[in-house]
Image (spheres, grey):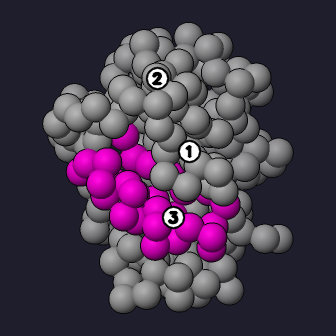
């Protein structure tokens, strides 16, 4: 089984998106951008951290996301009321959108808006129950298990409980792809792969490395 490795960017501004995409462009087909509104999680990222016109220009199709000709983007929307903004992220160029089960708002309405338009993932926190998956799993392309307690921040400690969560989801929904995001390193990745993870989202272990391309290659070799 080939594991998909997805580099993840938690950007303070649009310049960071551009800078990090340039580091890996040509070596990956997809990148995840973590979008935090400062409400659902304490951290705020671009475009919520401070207003600039880059996002507005992208929505007006006056410019595109960095490397859009060769890259697909998935947006991890760590936001409240996602149903109000998912259309904007589709217009921005999303290939995949991840919603969070614990977010305030109408998750079902957001899923309906996205169905058939982009791939849909649903993120579950460490302590999340499985009830929401039972409601929506047939409409999802994947589920994302968070491997850390404090989502929206990098450099967080890996929580071992996510390993059992991956196993449980694969047992109950064997046709549903499972991603893990948070705390993924060269040390934790083999355990997650053994548990059944199909996709690993990697932030600081790639972009914090001396050579991000070498780090990406090491993950792919697992």
Q: Residue at (36%, 64%) from the top-left corner?
A: 19
Q: Residue at (28%, 68%) from the top-left corner?
A: 155
How far separated are the C-alphas under marks 3 and 1? 10 Å
Task: Name the spot of residue 172 as percent of width and height, x first.
Answer: 74, 43
Task: Name the spot of residue 138 as percent of width and height, x first.
Answer: 77, 27
Does label 2 or label 3 sit earlier along the sequence?
Answer: 3
154 left or right, relative to 115 = left
Residues at marks 2 and 3 touching, judged by CB atoms closer than 8 Å: no
Does label 2 or label 1 sit earlier along the sequence?
Answer: 2
Q: Nearer the viewer, residue 23 or 8?
A: 23
Residue 15 located within the stretch drawn in magenta: yes
The correct choice, above or below, for 19 with respect to 38 in the image is below
Between disc 2 and disc 1, the foreground one is 2
How far separated are the C-alphas under marks 2 and 1? 19 Å
Element type at mark 3: strand
Q: Which mark is residue 74?
A: 1
Say which residue label 2 marks. 60
Can residue 25 be seen? yes
Residues at marks 3 and 1 touching, judged by CB atoms closer than 8 Å: no
Say which residue label 3 marks. 7
Rendering quarter of residue 167:
bottom right
Does label 3 or label 1 sit earlier along the sequence?
Answer: 3
The magenta stretch is: 7-36
Task: Name the spot of residue 118 as percent of width and height, x first.
Answer: 68, 31
Q: How many marks?
A: 3
């Amino acid at each position: 089984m080939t594991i998909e490795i997805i580099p993840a960017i938690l950007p303070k501004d649009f310049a960071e998106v551009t800078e990090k995409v340039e580091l890996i462009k040509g070596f990956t087909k997809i990148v995840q951008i973590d979008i935090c509104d400062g409400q659902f999680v304490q951290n705020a990222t671009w475009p919520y951290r401070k207003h600039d016109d880059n996002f507005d220009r992208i929505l007006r199709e006056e410019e595109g996301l960095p490397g859009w000709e060769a890259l697909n983007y998935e947006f991890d929307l760590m936001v409240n009321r996602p149903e109000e903004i998912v259309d904007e992220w589709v217009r921005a160029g999303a290939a995949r959108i991840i919603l969070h089960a614990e977010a305030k708002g109408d998750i079902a309405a957001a899923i309906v808006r996205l169905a058939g338009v982009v791939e849909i993932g649903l993120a579950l926190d460490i302590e999340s129950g499985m009830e929401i998956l039972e409601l929506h799993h047939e409409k999802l392309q994947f589920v994302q298990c968070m491997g850390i307690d404090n989502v929206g921040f990098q450099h967080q400690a890996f929580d071992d409980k996510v390993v059992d969560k991956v196993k449980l989801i694969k047992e109950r929904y064997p046709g549903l792809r499972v991603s893990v995001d948070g705390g993924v390193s060269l040390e934790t990745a083999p355990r997650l792969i053994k548990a059944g993870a199909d996709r690993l989202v990697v932030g600081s272990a790639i972009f914090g490395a001396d050579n991000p391309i070498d780090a990406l290659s090491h993950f792919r070799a697992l």
